[in-house]
Image (cartoon, coloured by chain):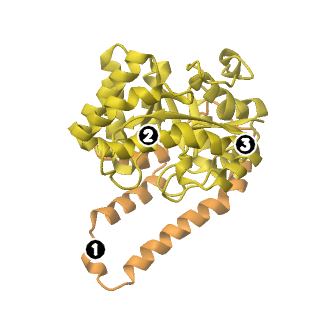
Chain colours: A yellow, B orange
Amino acid sequence: MKVIEPHIHMIARTTQDYERMAMMHTVCCVEPAFWAGYDRPSAAAFYDYFKQITEFEPTRAAQYNITHYCHICMNPKEAENVSLSREVISFIPEFLDKPNALGVGEIGLNKNTPNEMTIFEEQVDLAVERGLVMWIHTPHLDDKLKGTRMMVECLKGRGDVDPEKVCFDHAEEHTIGLIRDAGFWASMTIYPVTKNSPSRVVDAIERFGLEHIMVDASGDWGPSDPKTLHQAIFEMRKRGHRDEDVETVFYNNPCYFLGQSEKFAFRPNAPREEAWASR
Amino acid sequence: MKARLPSGKNAKQLLDMYYLQARMHLLETAAVLDRIERHPGFEGVSDDPRLVRLQDAARLLVDGQGERAERFQKLFSVE
């Protein structure tokens, strides 16, 4: 079974992680632009980072037969600095034109501040203008529910956002329903302490069904591992779910979402009406 | 609390699969509470909002209502 990793920060991983991912049948990964773990000192630092994820990372992934895509944006953490954010946003279009850049992400909120919301909306404008998919970061821990609600209400209120082109990531038990009820995609991130566990991810799939749902390992600076995606696959199989349903979550669903970009080369193994059909 | 995509297991099988894991998590939490309680200065933190919230969460587990994980998350969310 082929696996697509829809959200992972490979800049934070060693090349050995590409090797491990390839051995676990990952054929494709998507790397959204994110916070470096420290606040970057200038717009030039962002320019250099965007060059790395659009030019260098695809070559590193290709050594292991993994196709590397990315999303580009000003991240929610550093969006608090509005002037720096606008300077960065001014050259984002140059990188959105790169062959492996699929959409705008991971935009979103961090502490749910007015400045973060301003920069979120300006980048939504950019994605809508270009017809691109959006990958949205929902806040950590206590801030997640409020921030998710704020962004869902914002996007629904605009009237010009196609919900099929939007995925809210880091979704958990208390946000998946409100995301999906609004028509958006939800992705669940597996982190051992601060987000989901493999078991809770499969619980959510059982509770909410197969439609508009993905899983990712994210894998950045904190304790995380690309293997967690495959632990969730094993958990789903261990509970007796059909191979077709496992493949729907971990390969076909990313194809349905990411395939809305013409640059995305992978095709699903079944039409979604068939893959998502109730049994 | 009916599942939209039921697994191939029944409740007894799932209890057999997850009993030790659940026991482990509860035991770990019990140990953390004990650890805090037996160290100097416990009187100063016994009414810390975080401890109060943990106790509320523990009561939620056995209140006989469903969707415990979702209610747990909302208990720990800011509005």
Q: Position of residue A135 (x, y in %)?
A: 46, 32
Query: Residue visible at 58% across and 54% down?
Result: A13
> Which quadrant would residue A79 be assigned to in this image?
top left
**Marker disc for residue B10:** 3
Q: Amino acid at mark 1?
A: Val
On screen, A121 above or below A82? Answer: above
Check if mark 3's residue and mark 1's residue have beta carbons within 8 Å.
no
Q: Amino acid at mark 2?
A: His
| Nearer to the camera, B79 or A24 | A24
Check if mark 2's residue and mark 1's residue have beta carbons within 8 Å.
no
Q: Can residue A204 be seen in this snapshot?
A: no
Q: Disc 1 on helix, strand or loop?
A: helix
Residue highlighted by disc 2? A174
On screen, A141 above or below B28? Answer: above
Query: Do marks 3 and 1 share a chain?
Result: yes
Dot 1 falls on which chain?
A: B
Label 3, residues with CA under 10 Å away: few <14, some 14-19, many ≥20: few
**Marker disc for residue B45:** 1
Query: Residue visible at 25% across and 43% down?
Result: A80
Q: CA distance from mark 2 to mark 1?
A: 29 Å
Q: Disc 2 on helix, strand or loop?
A: loop
- Sequence-wise first label, 3 or 1: 3
Q: Disc 3 on helix, strand or loop?
A: loop
